[in-house]
């Protein structure tokens, strides 16, 4: 995969995680959906690494139904980036069924 937002790819236990630039997260979500066919968002998780900065790590768990492939997309961001961008990124990915508790905005 080649996109300017991808800073690093980590492979562990047969699964890939993309470490992303948070300033380009929306564009990366579009790329993964449109070009790489990761059309299902199965989960969104986050970790608060307080007192470290950047404080928040957000992880999107994606699934390509056509290829039956799974991918994690992760980035670390401050609170303002977290609030401004991550809900917009989740909106780029079609969600068939998702619990209302999964995506929280404040």
Image: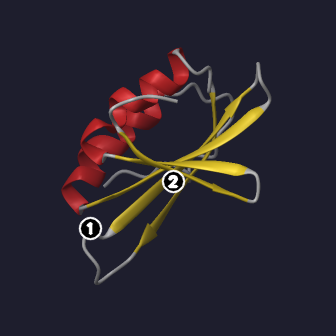
Give how far across and how far down residue 97 sits, in percent.
Answer: 69, 34
Q: Nearer the viewer, residue 3 or 49?
A: 3
Which coloring applies here?
Answer: secondary structure
- Relative to 23, 12 lies left or right: right
Instruction: State left or right for residue 81 relative to residue 67.
Output: left
In screen coordinates, is 76 left or right of 17? left
Q: Quadrant of the C terminus?
A: bottom left
Residue at figure coordinates x 76%, y 24% from the top left: 65
In the figure, 4 relative to 46: above or below? above
Front residue of 33 and 15: 15
Crowding at label 1, few (<14), some or many (≥20) Cα neighbours within 10 Å? Answer: some
In the current view of this chain or complex, which residue is farthest to the top? 34
| Labels in figure, total | 2
**Mark 2 element type:** strand
Q: Residue furthest right?
A: 68
Residue 26: percent from left, percent from top: 35, 32
Where is residue 25? Give x, y as percent: 35, 38
Q: Residue at x 29, y 42 (%)?
A: 85
Q: Position of residue 62 (x, y in %)?
A: 62, 38
Q: Which residue is mark 2?
A: 59
Examine the image and state in which quarter residue 57 appears. bottom left
Lower position in the chain sequence, tag 1 or tag 2:
1
Which quadrant holds residue 64?
Answer: top right
Query: What distance separates the C-alpha of mark 1 from that of mark 2?
Result: 14 Å
Against 48, residue 97 (above or below) is above
The image's mark for residue 43 is none
Q: Which residue is mark 1?
A: 54
- Single out the residue that lies furthest toward the left: 80
Q: Is label 1 in a helix, a strand or a loop?
A: loop
User: Is residue 10 found left or right of 14 in the rendered image?
Assistant: left
CB under 8 Å between discs 1 and 2: no
- The residue that appears at 61% across and 30% down in the rendered structure is 95
């Amino acid at each position: 995969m080649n996109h300017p937002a991808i800073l690093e790819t980590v492979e562990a236990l047969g699964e890939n995680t993309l470490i992303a630039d948070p300033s380009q997260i929306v564009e990366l979500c579009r790329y993964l959906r449109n070009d790489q066919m990761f059309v299902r968002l199965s989960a969104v998780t986050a970790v608060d690494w307080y007192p470290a900065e950047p404080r928040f790590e957000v992880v999107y768990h994606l699934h390509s139904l056509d290829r039956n492939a799974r991918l994690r997309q992760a980035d670390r961001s401050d609170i303002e980036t977290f609030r401004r961008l991550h809900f917009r990124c989740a909106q780029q990915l079609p969600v068939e069924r998702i619990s209302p508790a999964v995506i929280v905005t404040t």
